[in-house]
Amino acid sequence: MARKIYNGGEYLVQNINCRDVFTPEDFTDEHKQIAETIEQFVAGEILPINEAIESKNFDLVVQKLKECAELGLMMIDTPELYGGLELDKATSMLVMEKMAFARNFGLSYMVHTGIGMLPLVFYGTARQKDRYLRKLIHAEMIGAYCLTEPGSGSDALGAKTTAMLSADGSHYVLSGTKQFCSNAGFADLFTVFAKVDKVHFTAFLVERIFAGLEFGPEEKKMGMHGSSTRQVILDNVRVPVENVLGEVGKGHKIAFNVLNVGRFKLGAFCVGQEKYALSEGARYANERQQFNVLISSFGAIREKLADVTAMTFASEAVVYRLAGLLDDRLATIDKGIENYYTLYLKGIEEYAAECALTKVFCSESAAKSIDEMLQVHGGYGYIAEYPIEQLYRDERVQRIYEGTNEINRILIPSLLIRKEIGGKALGPGFEIAETGDFAAEKHLLQGMKRTYLALTDHIVKVFGPGITGEQEILLALADTAIQIFGLESAVLRAEKSSLAATEKKQELYRAVVTLCTFTARQHFVNAAEKCAVFLGNDSPLAAMKAVTSYKTRGLLAAKQLIAKATSQAERYIF
């Protein structure tokens, strides 16, 4: 039976049926085969050379990217017309999740297949795709993306790089400096953003061989040592007019739409990191003894294993729920029509808020998970020979790139308010009493949604269009929306998966939801109360009755059950 298609932000005004969400338990045999292929590739080809990659052996990185191409891993998101496979978003996210186990190499792959290729896929002309896309798919060329500048990061439209049309109209002359360009040390094709006549923000396809294109030295970074990050310097680079990507003055559409997908892909990458960290922590806890007993028997360690399992479960639920939303929406578009990608991008843009919240939720969950698993290692977690040390260093940047988490938080409620989510009536059936194992959690979610809507309505009435300047309030409001989507995704996943699960697995689903609910409710209450205090008016909190009345039961037993199963498996158990 086909899933119901929900609009962006609609989760805040509807009771969602669990059968209408896509979950990891819905993976097909094809999904699993692709995942297994990547697992084997990473274990056999990448992890043995991780030290060389960390030492910036970029020739080796390029060689392995070519091997990825031979396996078909560059074809996932590219159209069949140009040799791609154009698979669903669930597959694309699963590939990114598994590539997280490749550490630095995973980032190089993500940049190439994401922001390196997708601008061309979405906005390129047939001629541009003929010239470049097949080469990118086969890793004959490697892609990179140049948006940030030394003086403009979050304010991408404040770029100073210029593009001046030549007198004969045959080419543009690009001048300026781009900062923090991933893959720059070995990339062959760069999507560069510049202002035509210093005004019109525009994207260009720039080849490495173009005269005047220069590069700064490799940045000395805290983490991601095995990925290339350099300045890209444009010294009067002559770019043919046919290499304008999209329309002159419409570069912002390319930048923002590609960032939506990039945020989503990063969320999946973070899920993989959480699973990697958890397996390392659980394995170490079963090997390390203190006071003549394994530390995995200590309650302090068991609690960390349980909490990280729950965070991973929720992150995974968020990513694949969004994958399902996008796949369902995009499946309604006829691939044969001329304006396919115009409608395709509108479909992605519909869920821009969900893409942003996925990035925030998953990157912060990964940060907490990796930190806790390093703590399980004790002093050895600080030693480079243990994988958790590199994971800890590499993770930090994820709350900065693809839009800082602060920028994404401001974006989330801004987008939802623009959709008039706050002013919408609750959907039909919202008042129906829930039944079943997760009825209490669903009732809690109803209260969380009412509270969000009450806060939003009050904010809009007080500030109107001026709300964009009230960043502290928007940050707090964003956290309420994030926690609703995160908790609901976990609950719906558990409910749906329990329908066909064994009794033992059902018990694990109930336990992990108990953990997710306890944490999400705490974060939600804190954010909602902060928002109300900032407003100087706690009247919107009258809607929090269901939130404040919810009582967590069996939390310790749930944590012990999850911890025991995780410790025995020495990996993520769901």
Image (tube, rainbow, N blue to C red):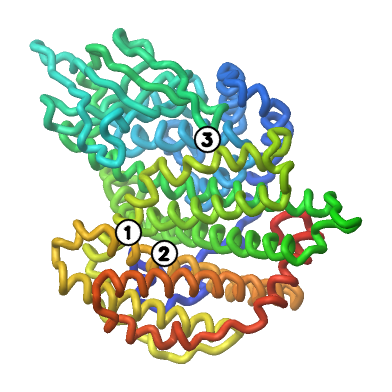
**Outermost residue toward the right?**
292
Q: Which residue is mark 1?
A: 412
Give the CA distance from mark 3 to mark 1: 25 Å
| Near-viewer residue (535 or 436) | 535
Relative to 56, is 136 on the left or the right? Answer: left
The quarter of the picture where the C terminus appears is bottom right
Mark 3 neighbour density, 10 Å: few (under 14) some (14–19) many (20 or more): many
Kindly identify the residue that appears in the image at 49 percent across and 24 percent down.
Answer: 220
Relative to 102, is 525 on the left or the right? Answer: left
Marker disc for residue 482: 2
- Residue 4, position in %: x, y? 42, 70
Whether residue 182 is visible here, answered yes or no, is yes
| Res. 103 image quadrant | top right
Q: Amino acid at mark 3?
A: Leu
- Residue 174, position in %: x, y? 22, 18
Q: Amino acid at mark 1?
A: Ile
**Outermost residue toward the bottom?**
433
